[in-house]
Image (cartoon, coloured by chain):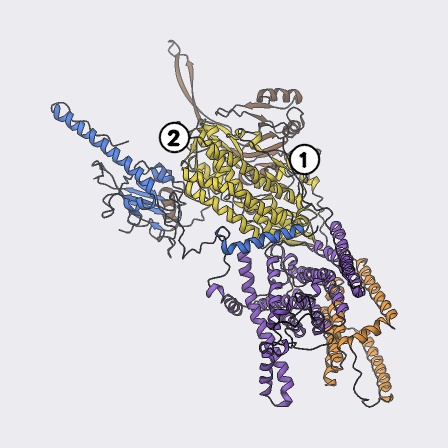
Chain colours: A orange, B purple, C blue, D yellow, E brown
Amino acid sequence: MILLLALLILVPAAAAMLRRNLVHSALLLVLSWAGLAAFYLWSGAEFVAFAQVLVYVGAVSMVVLFAVLLTRQNPDRAAPPDAAARLRAGAAVLTAAAVGAVIGHAILATPLPAAAGAPPVLTVRQLGLELMGRHAGSLLVIGALLTVALLGAVVLAAAEPGEKPGGKP
Amino acid sequence: MPPAPIFATLDPDRAFLERAPLLVRDFVTGLFPPSLQWLAGNLLAVVVIVLFFASLFALLTLAERKILGRIQNRPGPNRTGPAGLLQPLADAVKTLVKEDIVPRAADQVLHFLAPVVLVSLALMAFAVLPYGRHLVPVELDAAVLYFFAAGAATELAVFMAGWASRNKYSLLAAMRALAQLISYELPLLLSVVPVVMLAGTLSTTGIVAAQAGWTYGVIPHWHVLTPWGAAGFLLFFVSALAESNRSPFDLPEAESELIAGHLTEYSGFKYALFFMAEYFGMTALCGMGVTLFLGGWQAPCAFLEFIPSYAWFFAKLLLLLGVFMWIRGTLPRLRIDQLTRFAWKFLVPLALINLGTAAFWQLSAGWSGPALQLARWLVALALVAGPFTLLGRRLSAGVAPRTYRYAA
Amino acid sequence: MLGSGIIKGLAVTAKNLAGSFHDPARYVTQEFPEVQPQLPENSRNFPFLVADDGADPMGTLRCVACQICEKECPPQCIYIEKSKDKKPDAAGKLQLYPAVFAIDTSVCMSCQICVEVCPFDAIKMDQVFAIATTDRFNGLLLNREQLAKSNQYYHSIHPTEATEVDARLAAERKAAEEKARAAAAAKAAAPKPAAPPPPQPPA
Amino acid sequence: MLASGSAAAPFSSASVRPVHDEFHGDLLEVSMGPHHPSTHGVFRMMVTLDGETIVRLKPVFGYLHRNHEKLGENTTYLGSMPYTDRLDYLCSMTNNWAYALAVEKLAGLVPPERAEYIRIILAELTRLINHSGLIGFLMQDTGCSGTPLMYAFREREKVLDLFEALSGSRMMCNYQRFGGCRVDLTPAWVDSARRLVDAFPRFLDEFEALLTGNEIFMARTQGVGRLSPELAVNAGLTGPVLRATGVGHDLRKVDAYGLYPRFDFRVPIGAHGDTYDRYMIRVLEMRESVQILQQALRDLPAGPIMDPKAKLRGLRPKAGEAYGRIEGAKGEIGFFLISDGSPNPYRYRIRPPSFINLTVLEDLCLGHTVADAVIILGSIDIVLGEVDR
Amino acid sequence: METAEQIRDRLLARFPGAEITVVTNPGLSAQHSLLLGSPHARAIAQFLRDDPTLRLDQCSNVTGVDWPEKEIIDTVKVTVPDPAGGPPKVIEQKNKRLTPAYLEVVYHLYSIALRHGPVVIRTRTGNRSDQVDVPSLTPVWRSCEFQEREVFDLFGVSFSGHPDLRRILMWDGFKDYPMRKDYVDPDDYEWEPTPHDEVLARAKVHYPATPAAPEPKA
């Protein structure tokens, strides 16, 4: 079951990288987020799963799609893969392999405890108390961070210098 | 508890009608071997939901055209079948038979996927609504969050529809639809927060249980009968109207401007799917509205308990849907900028202030005695009415009926 | 208060919704095939030729082929060919009759100018509106036989107008007869003078 | 674009429209019509959009052009009377009256008093159905799904039944003749007319309750499509569109044709010249028409309905020309006739109000969104039969 | 409201060089008009609009009229000296002459401010073929914009100074001017059931194969 979920997350992400059409890759990215939410559900954390769907699939995907639409450069300018590009691609694969190896080693090395009893049953009320109690501060910081990021994106998109005058959102 | 209701013998839990659906379910699941019974039970729930709400959708389209007709002093469809009852069947056959034209330039995959995603998400939202005392398809702890997660994903499908048909009108309309959906997502959620806060749980059955009981056997403890509840219900209702693209906010399919908005390039059964998804969305939102504010399947008075709980839920649901159609027959449409300004400058602030009122209501729960109760009500009412009139006046600043003079 | 206008509007539609069930003024649809419309007496559709006696329409057509209506018809959709011979009309005078009298109902806009200008009350407006044919050209070209209808039919659709017309025609006929009798008497009284003056056709 | 020498008058079309001709990269050229559901007939608008706001709007029409004036020159004076019904096919009675008035001026015929009363009654009834029909269509454009339109048409049916009982046809009445009317009013007709007129204010109150105070309607129409009185007068606008800008010009008071001076009624004028004013002016005008109708039906004199001098056929007015105009529901509808003594007019010209009211369509729509352009077009009240002739 | 003659005299005083003549209207309505020469037409129109006593601020109607040349035979009595020295005889002499052909544009002006009118002004073109130019009055009254385009479309009068002179009713590819008296409508003939006289003749040309006229069914 876990393998199926892993595939559901990784395959759309990989496909997103390969697709030429920007909108397709954005939608595939959203699909992999949905896969992530499925993984949370499988592991019993309903609250996090629904939050993931609500926040990512609902709102962030919209921001991504809007960004893709508004700053769409004309697709035919993508340069054909000449020698330099191939070199860069090779280097990228190498670094990816190195990073993968390090993570793999770290996972295998740490001694995972056997399944220690049932996972703690957590009700939404306790989660709420926890969030609003000890972690209230971090919650507010994250909120502020997100809004700033969004406003930054809008300002960037609006003030985009470029040959097309008036790229208004 | 006031003196035992005269129908003491009919304890609501053991009334025959009340248990009827459960008996049916146990009988059906009994047919299967024990290992499959869990699967059979849930599958049965899914089948019942899909069948019931699909037929409700069919009747709703007929009811809408009948009510609109009656408002306009005309009979509405009455040619197909007695009083037009076979009209939905005729519509279904028509959409099935109609040629499904897909524009050549369209993105085939997305073009097909959009209606499918939309309908499936709309159907998923029905899973958590408590239709009766024991009739909850899925008992979830974070049910309300699940409901709005399903609702939020529909924007994605609308975008896919608009983008995939490769036509500048539908793209323009998809953008407008997204702007509308996103800007009304916020007041929708904010109007639900006070209910969750006071009910203390996210699970729908918990919320309905919190609205149980009657004072003096007649006045139910529904949230809508509290000042913050009434304001919350109004906000929820208006945002639900906008969320399901209904009357004053049906901008995306504004036929007087961009023909059929992002649905221009769809025909045949796919168009019917969009239509069905809109109705499912509307019914689901009405169901949630009933659950949160109108006491779900609670009977309005103690002595009316003998009527089964699911009857009350569907009566209230149909009542709300009737109001949706009534509004569609009356109000003109808002322009896109007025629509978003109305959401951000009026609904969101009111929803936030409503949070405050609900908090006050929660804290002042302890005030007993008629004088304090009255004070508690008055303060809450002031907290609701005050901002409403102030913001209302600011919103409709330049707009007022005028008086006219006559030429010499 | 912000929503008051909208609430008043909703009240109006609610009144209409409720009203449509009991108040006939708020339920105005007449379901056509089952409920035939009662046309007011003056209602007009395509013209028809009046024949005094329903049994022999071609014989007793009032039309004398004077072609005034053909000239006056704005879209020029009437087509008349005079007959070679003459036949006596109701008042006994020898009159021409139309050999061909065709109205092209695909061009006619039923403006009833032909009825207005016809001095002999030979053409009147009918009230039949559901006439459909499959053939666009000859199907809508109604000739003499299809156009002729009896005076009784005329009485049935335009009662007051028909009685007026009949009264006037009867009066004219009586005047014509007196003049003929007076002329005959004058001729009898003085058989020798010049030939009797021919009776003028009623103006 | 303008001939350089002459000083551009403040309202010449070039100076009013800030038309910048160099083509922006992201301007969207949208063609609305001629098969668009809200253009009141075969009418097209070439709209150039910059985002949501309109930068340029070129009306294109002529799809319903039947060369009505050439037809008029080839038929007799009486022959083109039924064709005037097809000009503004919602107000056939006022078209007939305007044509009859022009020919009476040319031929010197004077209709008797009863005929004048009948003409005023029919003209005011036509004004009622035209204004209520228009408001129904305007609401359809703002988005109410047909409810006000159905209420308006419910009342319109009653008036059309009256016209059918009188002239024989609901919309193509062909009723007026030069020097009077064709059919006299029967007492039964007058009673049903009186009942209808007395019941009309109740319908108007219901209509106003549904619309005038409605916040959404007010938000959608107030301040949309503002028109200045100077531009309105200069662009030759007439009718409710002109009066909405505050210019109190109503031919029933200015020319005082027919027996209008005998009736006391008021002419409502607006103050802002926007779409809401154009709507309210029409509602108030309907109330005034009801006043006129009640007075006319009360003291309708007996007597002949046709000028004895008038001959039905073979009207050959002396050589000369005449321009007669009346206050139709849409504005000043005029007929300019040049006769050379023959039974056919030498030149037969119609002055169509909605055609000329369209001159300012672009000035009204600039800077608004597509949704507003639809409402502004609806508030100008055009009928393509009259625009294209 | 001044009569046409008074207005003409004031205009002549104001614009000495302009040719303004009064065209009397023989009809009963007695709406006489002023014929303006082309060079001064726009200046006069501007004056008519801005003059405080007239203030003709609404140009209600713009009409095109086509006057093709007409053959007039006017008999004139001429005294011819008798070649044989006898007393001079008076004989009628019929000489044909062609009236000048031109296209004419008639403007009906009204004053909304002072509630009077109509003042009718006319402008004429040189002839009906090449000199068809007339000054446009759209810069003075914007109501003339669409109506002048219609006169251009249906009569072929080209208005100099019109901001946007295009065909308004006919489609742009249309060549001829339909409202002229000598306009021959194109022969895209569609068979009509009751053809008679020239319609019948043309039907025969088009549809020799089908029966020329419909035999009435006996």
Q: Is residue D124 visible?
A: yes
Q: Residues within 10 Å of mark 2 (few under 14, many from 20)?
A: few
Q: CA distance from mark 2 to mark 1?
A: 45 Å
Q: Is A47 displayed left or right of E128 in the figure?
A: right
Q: Is D150 displayed left or right of B286 in the figure?
A: left
| C-beta proximity under 8 Å, tags 2 and 1 | no
**Viewer-nearest residue: D362 or D5:** D362
Q: Is residue B107 above or below residue C38?
A: below
Chain letter of the residue beneath label 1 in the structure image: D
Q: Quadrant of residue A160?
A: bottom right
Chain letter of the residue beneath label 2 in the structure image: D
Badge 1 marks a residue whose secondary structure is helix
Residue C139 lies, in percent from the top left, at 35, 53
Q: Is C182 displayed left or right of E37 in the figure?
A: left
Q: Specify the quadrant that holds the N terminus of chain B.
A: bottom right
Badge 2 marks a residue whose secondary structure is loop
Q: Amino acid at mark 2?
A: Lys
Q: Specify the quadrant that holds the C terminus of chain B.
A: top right
Q: Quadrant of residue B209?
A: bottom right
Q: Quadrant of residue B125?
A: bottom right
**Viewer-nearest residue: B30 or C131:** B30
Q: Which residue is identified by label 2?
A: D311
Q: Which residue is identified by label 1?
A: D230
Q: Give the residue at x 48% y 47%.
A: D157
Residue E110 lies, in percent from the top left, at 60, 30
